[in-house]
Image (cartoon, grey):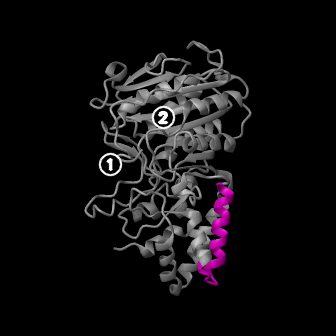
Amino acid sequence: MLFSLVLACVEPTPEAPPGREPADAAGDDTGGGDTGGNVEGGWQFLVYLVGDNDLEDWVTHDLNELEITGSGDGVEVLVQADRIDGYSTKDGDWTGTRRYRMVPDDDTRVVTSPVLEDLGELDMGAPETLAGFLDWASTNYPAEHRVLIFWDHGDGWGIQAPEAEDDAVAPPPMIGSDDTSGTDMSFAEGEVAAALTDSVSAHGRFDVVGFDACNMASWEVAHSLVPHARAMSAAQTTIGFQGFQYDLILRYLRDNLDTTPMALADEMSRGAVEVGLEDTHSATDLDQLGQMDAALDALAGAVLADDALKAPFFSYRRTTRGADAVWKNWYLDAGDLGAVIEAAGDPVLGPLGTTLRNSVGIAVPGPYGNEDYEYASGLTVWFDPDSEYIDLYTDGAGATWSQDTRWGELMRTYVKE
């Protein structure tokens, strides 16, 4: 789901599609009183659902989808959801912020899970609001394993406005757009890290951080999440309104409590493409990202050391395929960038392109893409000479990718002042 300053990923429809049938073997938990998440091997499945924007009509749709399988059998499905007035009158036309424990329900049109807390209007774009949700969940429903889903508009690092709209303003890099408060959370400014740090310090890294949001499968986002999660599930492209298939994910998790972070992240991404028909989705092993960091740093170092390589390197950018058909964006597919450099045969950069391509495959062993995106490697890397956000990219307090590699330094040499 993309930042609405420009336009939504797809045009919102007034009614959600018919719900799927409930899972046949979702478990026998039909009430709201069991707090089984404290069992050994249990899971928290946390959804931070920011619908205080033009996605409001889809809040109740996904709450109902979460109820198809719901909590039980060692899995606690916990949601903090925010709505705004004006886009939907469903479910009593409530606004403000609620907390739920989702329980199994075969009615895919009505949300029946009890409201555990009605918090009034909260700023869901504030790091402290997310941190409060995480603390509440772990205090009341402790579990050995944790999944955190960001459900909202997303813009990963940042994209350029459509080519046909030369005077349009590129949306800022962010996650979580709260229209009432006019806020969102920035990776580059360290706001997402600030929201996660206390929870990770107290309970360890999340097993999976997933994004039901657009353009989040970027190297930069992954790099910033390494201290906070073991695996990431996200799309390189803008996404439609299907996104994650929550009923299937939760059924898989309840049947496989001993799953690994990467196996779960892969199942989340597989369902998004093969069932939800999204363009791309991928599972990134954040513990294996270091080789990609080193490959990009080596490429940047080689170009920075030899001005004669600067023009050829820029030409490789022009040839590399992007990761979104809708936008004139310079979120380049990282694996394709490596392949283009490798194929050019430059004696210095060629081997470094091979290393980049291979390193992406190590971090993302099995990306998913439809027939238009069969080349997609699972992660993008930013390369935009027209960006107004170069200072954030290179010097932001949370821009770990520029702190740990020379890629940001190289990008600055290309940006038009």
Within 10 Å of the Cα at label 1, are there few (<14), some (14-19), or many (20+) other Cα atoms?
Answer: few
Q: Quadrant of the C terminus?
A: bottom left
Would residue 5 appear left or right of 333 to someone viewing this image? left
Three-letter amino acid code at the position of disc 1: Leu
Residues at marks 1 and 2 touching, judged by CB atoms closer than 8 Å: no
Q: Quadrant of the N terminus?
A: top left
Judge whether residue 414 can be spotted in this image: yes
Q: Give above or below for 340 relative to 69.
A: below
Determine the residue positioned at 27% across, 64% down. Answer: 166
Determine the residue positioned at 60% across, 32% down. Answer: 248
**The magenta segment:** 344-364
Which residue is labeled 1 in the image?
7
Nearer the observer, 320 or 386? 320
Report the disc number at residue 48.
Answer: 2
Q: Specify the quadrant of the image occupied by residue 59.
A: top left
Would residue 222 appear left or right of 114 to someone viewing this image? right
Q: Position of residue 340 (x, y in %)?
A: 57, 73
SS for dot 1: loop
What secondary structure is the stretch in magenta mostly built from?
helix
Three-letter amino acid code at the position of disc 2: Tyr
